[in-house]
């Protein structure tokens, strides 16, 4: 099983760490990865390679480190001061350390994650395992769910949740849409909330929840459990190009 590769971002060379091995980092030249910044601890931390994943230890007394997934949709982890052997699930990660002029960083390349064969036969016998969220990606309700999740998929920091009229407009030319009406979209949202994802009203008993609680809960759950992913955006019609001339500025924009 291969270990991990650690590389100073923007710097030459890299270090391979075999499973069971470790690499220290900090501003002290005696560390395996030197980060020459006066605000970085002399021995700031260490990475340890395991079979199929790696661990990060933050040996600083005051600084919190951030581990980003550059290939993901904004996922990141925080390693608080003195946190030892924090498992990092990213195959490719950027470790950010507060420094005197912003941050210093290094990259970690880990082995590809391993998965069991989904087509392998179940030899345990007994009843089959139920699917927790049985979604059909070819169904109209799934198309509605993708449209709901689109703003967050394209920008993880977005707080926009499309309204029903916006969903109808967004799905205008989607294959198999079949003329979704306001009532149909509301039906699909109710169906997703009650039967497929089984989200619950967050308001205390006896109090009314906000009108958009179902849509917000569906988006949150679908993205948290990776039920709707970037590749599902291909099910939606291509976004419309900005109207007007070059740069999307129309004549009315110019006139004010």
Image (cartoon, rainbow, N blue to C red):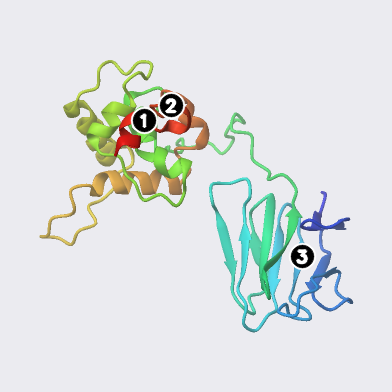
Q: Which residue is mark 1?
A: 250
Q: Is residue 141 visible?
A: no
Name the residue rendered at 16%, 28% in the picture: 183
Does residue 108 appear left or right of residue 212 in this picture?
Answer: right
Residue at screen point 58% across, 46% down: 72
Q: Residue at x 62, y 82 (%)?
A: 62
Distance in Å between CA atoms under marks 3 and 2: 54 Å
Q: Is residue 121 left or right of residue 25?
A: left
| Dot 2 crowding, Cα within 10 Å, few <14, some 14–19, many 20+ | few
Residue that protrudes farthest toward the front in the picture:
255
* Disc 1 residue crowd, few under 14, some 14–19, many 20+, Cα 10 Å: some
Q: Residue furthest left?
A: 206
Q: Mark number for residue 48? A: 3
Task: Please say if the residues under marks 1 and 3 sit with CB atoms less than 8 Å apart.
Answer: no
Question: Up-down: is 236 above or below 179?
Answer: below
Q: Position of residue 243 (x, y in %)?
A: 38, 27
Give the distance between the C-alpha atoms of the residues marked 1 and 2, in whole angstroms: 6 Å
Q: CA distance from mark 1 to mark 3?
A: 56 Å
Residue for point 81% across, 54% down: 5
Question: Looking at the rendering, which quadrant does residue 98 occupy?
Answer: bottom right
Placement of 192 over or under 110, stated as above or below: above
Along the viewing direction, whichever of 77 and 162 lies nearer the viewer = 162
- State left or right for residue 90 relative to residue 125: right
Q: Which mark is residue 245?
A: 2
């Amino acid at each position: 099983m291969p270990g991990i590769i650690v590389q100073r971002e923007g710097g030459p060379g890299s270090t391979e760490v075999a499973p069971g091995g470790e690499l220290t980092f900090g501003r002290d030249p005696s560390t395996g990865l030197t980060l020459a910044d006066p605000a970085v601890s002399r021995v700031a931390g260490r990475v340890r390679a395991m079979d199929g994943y790696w661990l990060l230890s933050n040996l600083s007394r005051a600084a919190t480190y951030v581990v980003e997934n550059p290939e993901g949709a904004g996922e990141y982890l925080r390693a608080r001061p003195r946190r030892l052997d924090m498992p990092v699930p990213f195959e490719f990660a950027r470790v950010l350390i507060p420094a005197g002029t912003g941050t210093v960083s290094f990259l970690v390349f880990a082995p590809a994650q391993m998965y069991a064969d989904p087509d392998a036969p179940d030899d345990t016998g007994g009843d089959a395992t139920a699917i927790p969220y049985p979604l059909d990606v070819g169904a109209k309700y799934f198309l509605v769910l993708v449209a709901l999740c689109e703003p967050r998929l394209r920008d993880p920091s977005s707080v926009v949740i499309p309204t029903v009229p916006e969903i109808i407009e967004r799905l205008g030319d989607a294959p198999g849409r079949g003329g979704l009406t306001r009532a149909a979209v509301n039906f699909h949202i109710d169906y997703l909330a009650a039967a497929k994802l089984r989200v619950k009203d967050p308001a205390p008993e006896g109090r009314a929840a906000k009108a958009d609680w179902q849509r917000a809960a569906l988006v949150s759950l679908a993205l948290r459990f990776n039920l709707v992913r970037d590749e599902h955006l291909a099910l939606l019609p291509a976004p419309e190009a900005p109207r007007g001339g070059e740069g999307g500025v129309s004549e009315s924009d110019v006139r004010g």
